[in-house]
Image (tube, rainbow, N blue to C red):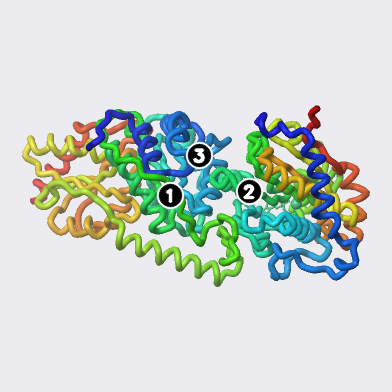
Amino acid sequence: MNERRMLGSDQELLDEHYEKVIAEESVCISDNLVYGKPETLTSTPMHYCPGCGHGVAHRLIAEVIDEMGIQEKTIGVAPVGCAVFAYNYFDIDMSEAAHGRASAVATGIKRVLPDRYVFSYQGDGDLAAIGTGETIHTCNRGENILIVFINNGIYGMTGGQMAPTSLVGMKTTTSPFGRDTHEMGYPLKITELIAQLPGVYYCSRVAVNTPVHVRKAKKAIYNGFKYQELNKGLSFVEIVTNCPSNWKMTPVESNKWLEENMIPFYPLGDLKVPKKEN
Amino acid sequence: MKELKLMKGNEALAEAVIRAGCDAYFGYPITPQSEVLEYLSKEAHARTGMVVLQAESEIASINMVYGAAGTGKKVMTSSSSPGISLMQEGISYIACAELPCLIVNVVRAGPGLGTIQPAQSDYFQAVKGGGHGDYKLIVLAPATIQEMVDHVKLGFELAFKWRNPIMILTDGALGQMMEKVELFPQIPRSFEIFEWATTGKRKERERSIITSLHIQPEKMEEINIHLQNKYRAIEKEEIRYEMRDCEDADIILVAFGLTARICRKAAELAKEKGIKVGIFRPITLFPYPYEVLNKLAGNTKMFLTVEMNAGQMLEDVKLAINGKADVEFLGRMGGIIPTPEEILLKLEEINQGVLQNE
Ligand SMILES: Cc1ncc(C[n+]2csc(CCOP(=O)(O)OP(=O)(O)O)c2C)c(N)n1
Ligand code: SF4
Ligand SMILES: [Mg+2]
């Protein structure tokens, strides 16, 4: 584990690299105003509801894979949740894990193919309820993978039941009168927990509800893949997202609600970055 | 040159795993099989570079197996009854996704936490499904430590031949006792890359997807039909069994694994008393040797099934014999191993009945 920590100024190097490789050709320059599809996304139309954050998160991962030129070396693990069909959209080899087990599946893949880039993509029910054990232990072993955690505070796929991350007072089909902490406990800040574990090298919380947030989210995903390349250990990126359908809001309303309710409880930013060494 | 060694069952099995060129083992401690993980932790990586990882649970182990097996590597796990129960969801996924792998169950008595003593009470779980959905494992039942060793090699061969999970169903007594074994020479690890596996999508091929999700019922039925056709082909090609003195036997003992060995002793004792006793031992529990057993019921009219459970394989014996002969049962449960003497007693009882009827 110690060798992994040696390069103190990794973050600076990465920042520099990111600026060069990614920022320059981003959406702002006129050539890019016509929106193209990243090569790592297939042409299959996504099944996500209009305005859902899953689609944006997919696109960002695909863009980073494209820009790093690692499509042939990346293996993804899809969860059980709305993103169960992620393998229809990413043009890479993928494994579809049982509910909650994506990080164990990713561990299995990475251990036998250590030179591949491996990531899991998991919802809050998947990662922080049924799969909590696998999540904690995968992180604690410092598996050299990237975990992308999609926190929409609800069980999207099964129709809007309460998730471990549902906010206090939040109405869901299984907390119809609002999440009551006395009966249902508190929303779980699993990312804060994860950040404590020594096996975790990089841990960040981002969102995709505004253009600025989208750019930061992409950078976090890039960091995750890059640290994996440098053999640093586990990277964990939480993306706070919406679920317009089960929140029973329009996409615009949902992004506003996310800004006003989710983000104050799940504040954005890095929870753990590599230490600078002198 | 033959390599003979005196070894404990679990350690011999672990040694065979290394020699079979296994790429990865994922497991969680549980008595009476922890020696497998312990032996591999000590020996394996240094000798072949194979991955050995102690997971946080059997649920994690089997899902690590799922991930690693999906890359086309030779991977396995082992456990004992309660741990194997935890793995059932994962095993069902592996069967549906048609991934090759080896799962060893060193059975202990249940239900529940039960006892760490040997039993054969996971027969139904291993042979009839265990997890959800219509799937089959190829189930091998070793009766000696030599067979435990040989079945590791055979298990991996069958796993890749059929792209199917294989289970070695053994028990706590075979796992713990010592016996002389002949070890096969080291097989080098294979670095073959399979088209179907998740190894990174190269430009020249479609992406590989390992999944058991087929949301359209028509597609899901198609997958099921494909699996069933595979299982029928396995039934044609892979049946293995052993017969002793069955040709003109008065009574045929039917038993698998450890109990088949005890039956041998009982048959010898019976011979001294003038009762001709044959032994039929299925080695594959799926596919089950129904037809051979049915043919035996042409000559012999009395069968005695002996198991360390409440009568699980008994149902298959009855299915095989299909009313052509009488099928009696002797079973001990809870970790008790039946003695040759009590089997002899039952044989004498049955023989008396046969004589009276004649
Ligand atoms: C073992 C098991 N239990 C329950 C389910 C049903 N199930 C499918 S998805 C899901 C929740 C998914 O929610 P989340 O992980 O938050 O993903 P989202 O759909 O919100 O993206 C549940 C409970 C299942 N497929 N397997
Ligand atoms: S149900 Fe929610 S999480 Fe699922 S696709 Fe629709 S909006 Fe997205
Ligand atoms: Mg969710």
From where the camera sits, is residue B195 visible? yes
Pointer 3 and pointer 2 on the same chain: no
Residue B190 — which label?
Answer: 1
Secondary structure found at label 2: helix
**Taking B152 as reference, is B196 left or right?**
right
Residue B341, percent from left and from top: 19, 31
Q: Relative to the observer, which residue lies in front, B171 or A151?
A: A151
Q: Amino acid at mark 3?
A: Val
| Circles 2 and 1: CB atoms closer than 8 Å | no
Instruction: Residue B235: name its quadrant.
Output: bottom left
What chain letter is assigned to the residue under label 1?
B
Residue A102 — which label?
Answer: 2
Q: Amino acid at mark 1?
A: Ser
* Residue density around tag 3, few if under 14, some if 14–19, many if 20 or more, within 10 Å: some
Residue B322, percent from left and from top: 26, 59
What chain letter is assigned to the residue under label 2?
A
Secondary structure found at label 1: loop
Secondary structure found at label 3: strand
* Residue density around tag 2, few if under 14, some if 14–19, many if 20 or more, within 10 Å: many
Q: Relative to the observer, which residue lies in front, A164 or A139?
A: A139
**Taking A138 as reference, is B176 left or right?**
left
**Taking A55 as reference, is B70 left or right?**
left
Give the residue drawn at x 33%, y 45%: B151
Give the residue drawn at x 70%, y 50%: A122
Residue A54, percent from left and from top: 77, 58
* Residue density around tag 1, few if under 14, some if 14–19, many if 20 or more, within 10 Å: few
